[in-house]
Image (cartoon, grey):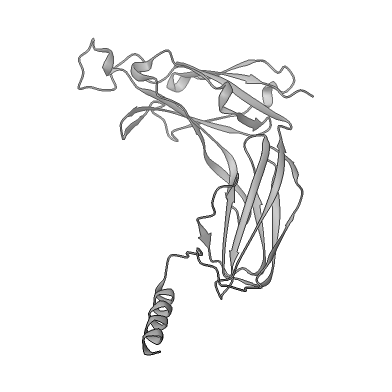
Amino acid sequence: MKNLLIISFFCLSLLGCASDNSIDTPAELSTFNIELVPSTVNVTIEETLSITVNANEKIELLGTSLDNLEVKNFSNLGFGSSVVLYFNFDTPGQKTIRVRALNSKNGISEKQVIVNVTRGNTIKITGMKVVSFYNINQTWDPEYGANDPNRLADVVFGFSKLKISNQFQNGYNMQRWFVSTVKENQGDLNWGLTNDDLYIKSDKKLRVGLVDKDGDVVQDLLNAVPDYKEISFTDYLISKPNTITYSFPDINLQFILTVEWPIQ
């Protein structure tokens, strides 16, 4: 009996000292339970979806995951017995949102919601061509000689757009959305993006950045402050061209987007 008491005390001490929000070992016979109430199960790309999590006890920890991935990251924000979560999606298709909660006694409850996401009124970006940028065809890697093609920029572009910044708050901010492959030594500066599922609402702004990337070293090819240009599609909502040219002569920047417009 003495040995049993020592082992039990040892186990309790380990649990009491844990600090990693792990919920891998649920308490047995727990009656803790959550229910998920989605605002809808049919949304369009970039539309806000809310899910209300109602519990029969106070929620100590809460975690979410998408597309049936394991729930690993948890938050403790003083939830009470109810909390509202917010989501939006970049691509069409069926999405699975899993929510896992823990009460004060290590009781676990996990539920999921399946959401159908459609394209809606979004533009699909299918291609990018960079025509010019600051110091194009010139030396960006001075360790190479004047006639060595390795001196040229290894070009990468990136897109940022408005996305939900925090699942616990209904707010959007600009976040990195897509980063291209590298075109070494300038390459052909053409990127086919059809298979990357890049959808954006036609009334939303898009930020575009362009850099020379050598390993972990990055140089801004816009040579500007801020280090991006913000564009929109509003001037083309009527004409709906398949290619749109954006020019910024002050920094010698020009690029062409190829797009697919939504079918009305």
Q: Residue at x 37, y 90 (%)?
A: 2
Q: Is residue 226 above or below residue 173?
A: above
What percent of the width, then of the height, locates residue 253? 46, 20
What percent of the width, then of the height, locates residue 103? 59, 71
- Drawn side of residue 119 relative to residue 2, left or right: right
Q: Residue at x 77, y 48 (%)?
A: 40
Residue lying at the far top of the rendered structure = 147
What percent of the width, then of the height, locates residue 78? 58, 70
What percent of the width, then of the height, locates residue 99? 62, 57
Q: Residue at x 61, y 68 (%)?
A: 79
- Drawn side of residue 151 relative to residue 156, left or right: left
Q: Quadrant of residue 196?
A: top right
Q: Is residue 179 above or below residue 40?
A: above
Residue lying at the far right of the rendered structure = 264
Q: Residue at x 42, y 12 (%)?
A: 188
Q: In the picture, which quadrant includes the N terminus?
A: bottom left
Q: In the picture, which quadrant includes the C terminus?
A: top right
Q: Is residue 21 above or below residue 132?
A: below
Q: Nearer the viewer, residue 170 or 70?
A: 70
Residue lying at the far front of the rendered structure = 1
Report how many numbered discs are placed on residues in the image: 0
Q: Quadrant of residue 231?
A: top right
